[in-house]
Amino acid sequence: MNYQVVLDEIKDEIKDFLKKGKVADYIPALANVKKNEFAMSIIDLDLNEYHVGSYEKNFSIQSISKVFTFTLALLNYSKELYKRVGHEPSGDPFNSLIQIEHENGIPRNPFINAGAIVTTDSLLSIYKENTFDYILQFIQNITNDKTISFDNEVYTSELKHGYRNVALVNMMKSFGNIENLTNSVIQTYFKQCSISMNTQQLAKSMLFLANHGINPIKNEVLINEAKAKRINSLMLTCGHYDASGDFAYRVGLPGKSGVGGGIVAVVPKKLAICVYAPRLNKQGNSLAGTKALELFTSKTGLSIF
Amino acid sequence: MNYQVVLDEIKDEIKDFLKKGKVADYIPALANVKKNEFAMSIIDLDLNEYHVGSYEKNFSIQSISKVFTFTLALLNYSKELYKRVGHEPSGDPFNSLIQIEHENGIPRNPFINAGAIVTTDSLLSIYKENTFDYILQFIQNITNDKTISFDNEVYTSELKHGYRNVALVNMMKSFGNIENLTNSVIQTYFKQCSISMNTQQLAKSMLFLANHGINPIKNEVLINEAKAKRINSLMLTCGHYDASGDFAYRVGLPGKSGVGGGIVAVVPKKLAICVYAPRLNKQGNSLAGTKALELFTSKTGLSIF
Amino acid sequence: MNYQVVLDEIKDEIKDFLKKGKVADYIPALANVKKNEFAMSIIDLDLNEYHVGSYEKNFSIQSISKVFTFTLALLNYSKELYKRVGHEPSGDPFNSLIQIEHENGIPRNPFINAGAIVTTDSLLSIYKENTFDYILQFIQNITNDKTISFDNEVYTSELKHGYRNVALVNMMKSFGNIENLTNSVIQTYFKQCSISMNTQQLAKSMLFLANHGINPIKNEVLINEAKAKRINSLMLTCGHYDASGDFAYRVGLPGKSGVGGGIVAVVPKKLAICVYAPRLNKQGNSLAGTKALELFTSKTGLSIF
Amino acid sequence: MNYQVVLDEIKDEIKDFLKKGKVADYIPALANVKKNEFAMSIIDLDLNEYHVGSYEKNFSIQSISKVFTFTLALLNYSKELYKRVGHEPSGDPFNSLIQIEHENGIPRNPFINAGAIVTTDSLLSIYKENTFDYILQFIQNITNDKTISFDNEVYTSELKHGYRNVALVNMMKSFGNIENLTNSVIQTYFKQCSISMNTQQLAKSMLFLANHGINPIKNEVLINEAKAKRINSLMLTCGHYDASGDFAYRVGLPGKSGVGGGIVAVVPKKLAICVYAPRLNKQGNSLAGTKALELFTSKTGLSIF
């Protein structure tokens, strides 16, 4: 299939959607983006690349970082991690404390904020003060790209305005589900959210999940097949907060979105894909990005269903 | 792949799990089953059949009926149905009223009780007093099996003990999301839950979902491809109540369970599968059945992820 | 103190408030009232009476009936009743099912709908098919007024539209907290809500609570002092749904409101008072009635605080 | 009435209850108390004093401090404060975040933790870095006792373990309902909770509420009558977390408890009373203290109902 043609068509058809939705503005640094920008990248398992739009333009990956830290955690833990974070859809918004209070401080899954914070805490217990460096190196390694870094302005902004996440980490600490100092946990979490990448890099970073755990860039086993499939299943059921069902329904691919406007997705055994469009729908997922991926599976028939 | 060998292995490996869990006992008629029974059927798109255990023994399909009524509703409605029932995982147990009260009487998805009741109500608005007959004929038609019927003892038992479902239909009526008489709706709903089938029939009945909407038994288009995929995505994200994420994580197939002990699942473009084992886990899904399907995807690599 | 002067002043000062708020319209029979009507009655323990407005005009007592049925239940039960209904404010609206689901079918207090339904069920277990007659006779007896009856049009209307209450009784039945047939319970409950009284009769009916359990009309002990005080405390903490705190804060008297527009209140050791004004605030309590009682305690200094 | 006789009788009858319940142990400093200690003080409006037990022994006043800060806030604010904190019972435990999330960061009342934190924040906006000093001076002033101070060990302990309260202040900050730095707010709040007093001092400190706002110790108007009554009504409906209804039901007096084991209460126009017994019931109120106050109103007939 000629993916370049597909991407060009999508770029054309998506135009009207680029003006809808609202850019994340809870921190000033995120609000300072070109609001109508669009980029989309496909990389298949033979490493053929297809791009459209500003695919070399960096943006804040935000919650997409949760896929990387959860993968790292799965490399270090197995069943003990599942006692601290579940794998069920939450049915609640990404930053809800209600479920945490009802369920003794155990977040429903690693892709809502609370679950990602626990995941980061589990890494801190291993990597200590080097945790963020390990996370960043892990991403640089799987993409074979040492230029990837984080945006200090976004990080500082998160530190200043992220009261809800500070509430989450303290709430879970009160239930005994945070092992390290709340400040260390929240700083590391905010830093990982502040990592900047473009659609090309993000598509590359997801290839190991499209390839059952083997990173085709370096032809090395990154994680075993069972765990790779489980990360995919989690992206499908929980990757888009309380719009996860809708994304599965309309797009039909495992994916993960971030409030920075990026969405990654994988077609198992075939390819990884990333789209960027900063305006969000009311659940906090890229509005045009979701539509672009819906067009992609409609045109290619590559939904997993 | 030799599915018969796979089924025989599973039957052997599943033995210990058949003694775990509890048979549904909220109605006496359901509690009267052989507790350790097991059956499993695979039918591929070429109609080759593979069975193990008591695959000709009928059991109560219960919530599996929700797949049939939702399919029927999608044949009659499109966007107007989505205003009355969502497509997000609920994060709550199958019979919860909390989400209904918080969200103005709109159930999260058609595979929790409240959503299935709304679906049945939407059919009543079309088929009136013949609704149950249409539902039953639809199932007989897609399986090409006129012997399929419902169990009157189970139906009577549900009528007598189904207070929670009566609460659900009245709650939604109070929000204006039930169009017909509450008694008609609940009777039709209880009757559809009381339909009896065996694993062979249920595997057959799911072939159209494995085949993108075309029923291979009669080689006819039952529903369009987009809608068939969407039903599959809903089974994946919402098919097992608040254990849907766990099922996706461990099994990796679109599926739907019933408290009667049955679970159906599909491998898109390949086959349909049904397992029966009446003892349930605490979320109300067949305990050994879930394990059997996990073994199936592990052995065959047929997870969609 | 000259209560007649106080009442006349209140009638004058309340005028603007009589046009605010909305008459209950969930059943047509309740919506058919003169919207701006006003009546207020004070009766002291020496049986001196003071009235203003249409104090002989009957209206639907609705939830005020909960005080009578709870008193009757306390005459028949003691600790066993407290296992079935609590005595804490609920913090939720009067017809919420959420708390019921979270707390195993045990309502927080007897003055929200669910709690009153359980109370009525407890009476049905004793008085069987004569339950409503006993309730009505009890009210006729304590007011020494055999003319008091119920409004059949309101009753029929409730039966036709009371889906939410039908949901409540079925929900509690599913938890095992309803002993009798759901239909019998809900019919009796709707009938007690349909009783018609005027402010004079209602003020009379509360005298035993102002007088520590002794009805001054007949000079007989109706209920012991401890229980009378407890009913008063429940009216104070739970008598006005999720506006109970506000009523205590502004008025400072034990009281009970009904969506028919009536509010009763007592000044312990002094008097009983009833006000009628059918337009309701958003919590379902008479808007002008609440204001009138606030004026009453301001002018007389008779708040219990 | 001879209150000394009443106190002596209570001391005798309470013995068995002193061994029931559990001392607060969420911070080590609170767990280090004599578990079976008991003290009770009554002071009437003529300043006659009656004591029993270790009435000169200091303990941590904890949530009783909320009465002082709310009084101070009412002296500085009127309607603008009610926009930031309600006056309804919450129906939830003292440290719940659920209601805060559902209701846009507005706590239900000033006597749950969240509401007290908002109250303290409102004082910080006025008194800045001197806020705690003002709070302490206010208490010293109304009791005419300059020896009252706070316990630094308890304060340090709260700072170290009070994750849940840190979660609360950050949650409300995320909704815009905290004006000052979260750290300043939480430090001031923890410090006010760490104030140490004995039953004699606490009974004195409540006299102005028993006397409609006039402090009989100095014969000066502390707060106007309407506001004094409103504080009393709030203590009655919300003073004991999710056991407020039960306290009103059994004791029938406006009161406020603290997890340190103290409870204060007032009999309007008559007296103030304080009891200390550190073992708590499951809602976090002094178990023997509640029983002692129940005995007090039974013996004296001084319930407000």
Image (tube, coloured by chain):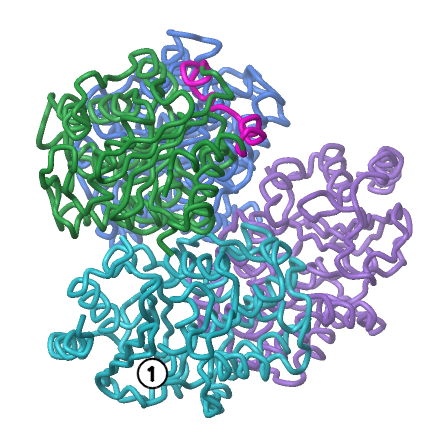
Chain colours: A cyan, B green, C blue, D purple
Which amino acid lies under the numbered mark 1 shown in the image of this protein?
A: Gln
* Residue C240 visible from this viewpoint: no
When the figure is inspected, residue A92 is found, relative to residue B34, above or below; the finding is below
Q: Residue at x 47, y 19 (%)?
A: C217
Which of the two residues, C167 or C249, is positioned nearer the viewer here?
C167
Tell me, yes or no, whether the highlighted magenta stretch contains residue C85.
no
Tell me, yes or no, whether the highlighted magenta stretch contains residue B15.
yes
Q: Mark 1 lies on which chain?
A: A
Q: Which residue is drawn at 22% across and 50% down?
A: B229
Tally of marks: 1
The spot of residue C151 in percent (x, y) is: 24, 21
When the figure is inspected, residue C29 is found, relative to residue B228, above or below; the finding is above
Which of the two residues, B165 or C149, is positioned nearer the viewer here?
B165
The spot of residue B147 in percent (x, y) is: 21, 16
The spot of residue C98 in percent (x, y) is: 43, 41
Q: With A137 as the anchor, is D200 left or right in this view? A: right
Q: Quadrant of residue A286?
A: bottom left
Q: With C47 as the anchor, is C58 left or right in this view? A: left
| Circle 1: element type | helix
Q: With A129 as the anchor, is B200 left or right in this view? A: left
Q: Quadrant of residue D258?
A: bottom right
* Residue C160 visible from this viewpoint: yes
Q: Quadrant of residue D147?
A: bottom right
Mark 1 = which residue?
A200
Label 1 crowd (10 A; few <14 / some 14-19 / many >=20):
many
Q: What stretch is highlighted in magenta?
A: B13-32
Q: With D282 as the anchor, is B57 left or right in this view? A: left
When the figure is inspected, residue A50 is found, relative to residue D279, above or below; the finding is below
The spot of residue C63 in percent (x, y) is: 37, 32
